[in-house]
Amino acid sequence: MSFVADIDPKSVWRVLVDALDILPGAELIDRDDWVQLRTPSSRVHNHNKILRAKLAHEEVDIRVTQVLAEHAERGASLQWWVDEDSQPDDLGERLRAAGLTLTGRTLGMVRDVPKPPYPKPPMGVTVRRAGADDCALIGRATAAAWGQPPAFGLVAADLARRVFAGEATGVTFWFAYDHGRLAGVTMLRTLPELGYLQGAAVMPASRGKGIYRALTWARLAELQRLGHKRVVLWANPQTSGPPAKKMGFKTVARAAIFAWECPSDSLRRA
């Protein structure tokens, strides 16, 4: 029996909202026509996002100008998702005209959580679940694997500290090693209805060695142990998308991701 037949594009998109890292004092506007996370205490786009916008054609430019002005005033960067349910049809073009940058496209993919046995990792590859002493390492690995400056990883390290302190729930972190050398890092979120494979990143020197698949199978095994039936991921069409497809994931949604980087230090917490 398949458990994914009842998952539609909106359900796959909804995990983005349900998995938001909502800090104290943050405001989440969650309407059918507008979904926005605004966090006065944070300047990074992880905490300042628009995930759904259904706007009349004549109001787009005014709304975008207002949003950017508010973020500029407090020195915060912004991420804006445009999916197949966004309106108007030229919203992405209007965002680019306003100064946002298209940073990538992504596929919302889903599959049933498989039963064991699972494929063994490639020779020399091991996967382990991170512990409370690994918060700083999670941050460093995240920055290195994504090819970002060290400050980029501070957001992941901060989330890890809050998870292990019991302030955030439903999140686990995982490392992969290539012959003993740190090769990748990822997260798993367990939501009420499904699992969400989030943020897998592999070090440049270890790409093409099955690290992504090893991290994915480890998280699928954990979901099976926990009794989850369905799992979602959002994948880059050029990198994680192809191996995810080979692992049985089916694309049911698509989105484009835009970003606006505030001229001030967008990676520094207020």
Image (cartoon, rainbow, N blue to C red):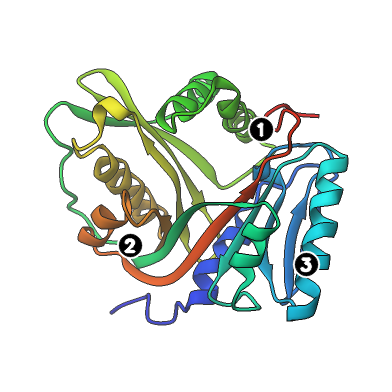
Can residue 229 be seen in this snapshot? no
Crowding around mark 1 (Cα neighbors within 10 Å: few <14, some 14 to 19, many 20+) is some
Q: Secondary structure at mark 3?
A: helix
Disc 2 to disc 1, C-alpha distance: 28 Å
> Compared to 52, does 127 lie above or below?
above
> Compared to 59, does 190 lie above or below?
above
Judging depth in this view, the residue of 2 and 55 nearest the camera is 55
Q: Earlier in the sequence, mark 2 or mark 1?
A: 2
Q: How many marks?
A: 3
The quadrant where residue 59 appears = bottom right
Q: Quadrant of the C terminus?
A: top right
Q: Quadrant of the N terminus?
A: bottom left
Q: Position of residue 63 (x, y in %)?
A: 81, 65
Crowding around mark 2 (Cα neighbors within 10 Å: few <14, some 14 to 19, many 20+) is many
Tell me the number on the disc at residue 162. Answer: 1
Q: Earlier in the sequence, mark 3 or mark 2?
A: 3
Disc 1 to disc 3, C-alpha distance: 38 Å
Q: Residue at x 18, y 38 (%)?
A: 121
Q: Secondary structure at mark 1?
A: helix
Crowding around mark 3 (Cα neighbors within 10 Å: few <14, some 14 to 19, many 20+) is some
Q: Amino acid at mark 1?
A: Arg
Q: Residue at x 31, y 47 (%)?
A: 216
* Residue that protrudes farthest toward the front in the picture: 97
Q: Would you say 118 lies left or right of 47 here?
A: left
Badge 3 vs badge 2, beta-carbon distance below 8 Å: no
* Residue that protrudes farthest toward the left in the picture: 123
Q: Which residue is mark 2?
A: 113
Q: Which residue is mark 3?
A: 61
Judging depth in this view, the residue of 203 and 157 nearest the camera is 203
Q: Residue at x 38, y 65 (%)?
A: 109
Q: Earlier in the sequence, mark 1 or mark 3?
A: 3
